């Protein structure tokens, strides 16, 4: 199984300031079709997860452009350019390159 | 509006069975692979099971923790995906989410509690 490791576990942030979350996999996430199936999901308190970013850097429909994803191979990053109050929650990276699909442990973003 | 609504959760004793349903609306679920994910209380997300669209063979896959106990099925005529859960264990206690294809649509979830 592919192991996904997220850091930090918790990220105290200041409104209007940037935030960054790292996600590393223990093997390459490049699929045989050439795509890298690394996604970022946001889970606000009491809500189901919501897709933010797919295939490393593509923002899902309706996701604000303050969210961006980058990386390649085994190292990936989610950045929030200016944290807003509604960004509070837990963020997960997830790989869908290979079954079983696996998640990072989550990063709690709190003001 | 694209929606996934799960149902069928509840309190069940260890060793018993339960079947979850996921009803899709606002899109043709037959055009998509579908998955179940779960989240134990206070824990992170875990993928449980996957079923491919029938035009791609309808293949299924399972997490090791549920393989041999859970079965995923789909009835595209009713836009429903099922998760048949057998030989339930206390560690299966979680909120179960139905999820479309590339994880772009998530249901709110249904709670399964396995306890004596």
Image (cartoon, coloured by chain):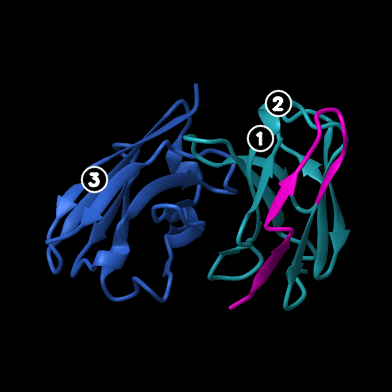
How far, Cα to Cα, is label 2 from label 1?
A: 6 Å
Residue matched to label 1 = A88
- Dots 2 and 1: beta carbons under 8 Å? yes
Q: Secondary structure at mark 3?
A: loop
From this view, report whether residue A39 is shown above or below residue B106.
below
Disc 3: CA contacts within 10 A as few (<14), some (14-19) or many (>=20) = some
* Image-based side of B81 in relation to A17, left or right: left
Q: Name the quadrant containing residue A109.
A: top right
Give the image location of residue A83, x and y in percent. Answer: 80, 32
Residue matched to label 3 = B9
Q: Which residues are magenta?
A: A1-20
Which quarter of the image is occupied by the N terminus of chain A? bottom right
Residue matched to label 2 = A85
Q: Secondary structure at mark 2?
A: helix
Tell which subunit mark 1 falls on. Answer: A
Dot 2 and dot 1 within a common chain: yes
* Tag in front: 3 or 2: 2
- Please give the letter of the chain rendered in cyan: A
Disc 1: CA contacts within 10 A as few (<14), some (14-19) or many (>=20) = some
Q: Colour of chain B?
A: blue
Label total for image = 3
Which of the pair B10/B70 is nearer the observer? B10
Q: Is residue A3 magenta?
A: yes
Q: Residue at x 79, y 43 (%)?
A: A58
From this view, report whether residue A62 is shown above or below residue B19.
above
Which quarter of the image is occupied by the C terminus of chain A? top right
- Dots 1 and 3: beta carbons under 8 Å? no
Tell which subunit mark 3 falls on. Answer: B
Which of the pair A49/B34 is nearer the observer? A49
């Amino acid at each position: 199984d592919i192991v996904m490791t997220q850091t930090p576990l918790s990220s105290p942030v200041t409104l209007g300031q940037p935030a960054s979350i790292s996600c590393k996999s223990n093997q390459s996430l490049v699929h045989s079709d050439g795509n890298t199936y690394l996604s970022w999901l946001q889970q606000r308190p009491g809500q189901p997860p919501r897709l933010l970013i797919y295939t490393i850097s593509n923002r899902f429909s309706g996701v604000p452009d303050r969210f961006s994803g980058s990386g390649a191979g085994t190292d990936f990053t989610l950045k929030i350019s200016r944290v807003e109050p509604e960004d509070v929650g837990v963020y997960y990276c997830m790989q869908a390159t290979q079954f079983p699909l696996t998640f990072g442990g989550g990063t709690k973003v709190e003001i | 509006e694209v929606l996934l609504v799960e149902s069928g959760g509840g309190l069940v004793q260890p060793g018993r069975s339960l079947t979850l349903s996921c009803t899709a609306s606002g899109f043709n679920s037959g055009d998509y692979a579908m998955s179940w994910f779960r989240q134990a209380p206070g824990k992170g997300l875990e993928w449980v099971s996957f079923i491919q669209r029938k035009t791609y063979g309808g293949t299924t896959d399972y997490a090791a923790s549920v393989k041999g106990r859970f079965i995923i099925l789909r009835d595209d005529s009713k836009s429903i995906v099922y998760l048949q859960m057998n030989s339930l264990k206390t560690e299966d206690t979680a909120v179960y989410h139905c999820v479309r294809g590339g994880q772009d649509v998530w249901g709110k979830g249904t709670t399964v509690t396995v306890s004596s």
